[in-house]
Image (cartoon, rainbow, N blue to C red):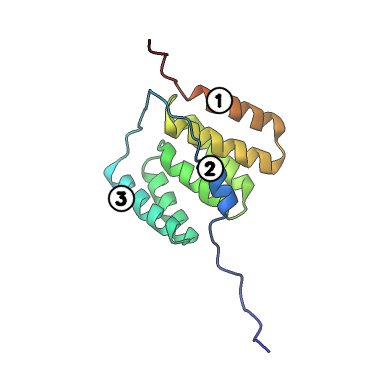
């Protein structure tokens, strides 16, 4: 007989959530706006991404919260906090951080689209249908398609 497991299982990224956050058929925008990031924030963000890839969610969140205190208007930081919260099953926190991300994200491009996509996923998980519909509509406005060439 095996001994009883103590503590909770290790948290890992949910591949179904990951597929919604980073879809393979993501539309490309011809206009790409990249927000500026303070060097200290960029360093913390990169460390957090590495820890996130290793499923070290608590460590990643801690680094992102430090980065947020340095630069509160960085949509990529709040976006990653929301993404990690989705993987942890905390849709309320994901919704909160995704809302902040959408408020600070650029109006066009990948960062904009991903912020609205994460907000739509969190809203769906919480049953906020109107909020989800609005987020999906705003997400589509982030993508600028190239005009047809003749």
- Pointer 2 residue: 21
Q: Nearer the viewer, mark 1 or mark 3?
A: 1
Figure check: 65 above or below 117: below
Which x, y percent locates residue 122? 62, 41
Which x, y percent locates residue 53? 43, 57
Which x, y percent locates residue 65? 44, 50
Question: Quadrant where the N terminus lies?
Answer: bottom right
Figure check: 104 above or below 56: above
Residue 28: quarter of image: top left
Label 2 – label 1 distance at C-alpha: 15 Å
Label 2 – label 3 distance at C-alpha: 23 Å
Residue 71: quarter of image: top left
Q: Earlier in the sequence, mark 2 or mark 1?
A: 2
Q: Nearer the viewer, mark 2 or mark 3?
A: 2
Q: Nearer the viewer, mark 2 or mark 1?
A: 2
Judged from the image, the secondary structure of the residue bearing numbered disc 1 is: helix
- Pointer 1 residue: 138
**What residue is rendered at 61% in x and 74% in y?**
7
- Pointer 3 residue: 43
Q: Earlier in the sequence, mark 1 or mark 3?
A: 3
Judged from the image, the secondary structure of the residue bearing numbered disc 2 is: helix
Which x, y percent locates residue 103? 49, 30
Q: Earlier in the sequence, mark 2 or mark 3?
A: 2
Question: Quadrant where the C terminus lies?
Answer: top left
Judge from the rendering whether residue 17 lies leftward or rightward of residue 62; answer left or right.
Answer: right
**5 and 72: which one is in front?**
5
Label 1 – label 3 distance at C-alpha: 30 Å
């Amino acid at each position: 007989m095996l001994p009883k497991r103590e503590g909770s299982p290790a948290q890992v990224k949910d591949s179904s959530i990951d597929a919604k956050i980073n879809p393979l058929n993501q539309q490309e925008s011809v206009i790409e706006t990249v927000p500026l990031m303070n060097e200290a924030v960029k360093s913390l963000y990169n460390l957090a991404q590495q820890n996130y890839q290793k499923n070290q969610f608590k460590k990643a969140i801690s680094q992102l919260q430090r980065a947020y205190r340095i630069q509160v208007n960085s949509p990529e930081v709040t976006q990653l906090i929301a993404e990690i919260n989705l993987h942890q099953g905390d849709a309320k926190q994901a919704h909160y951080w995704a809302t902040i991300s959408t408020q600070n994200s650029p109006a066009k491009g990948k960062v904009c689209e991903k912020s609205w996509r994460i907000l739509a996923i969190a809203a769906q998980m919480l049953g906020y249908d109107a909020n989800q519909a609005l987020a999906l509509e705003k997400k589509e406005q982030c993508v600028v398609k190239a005009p047809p060439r003749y």
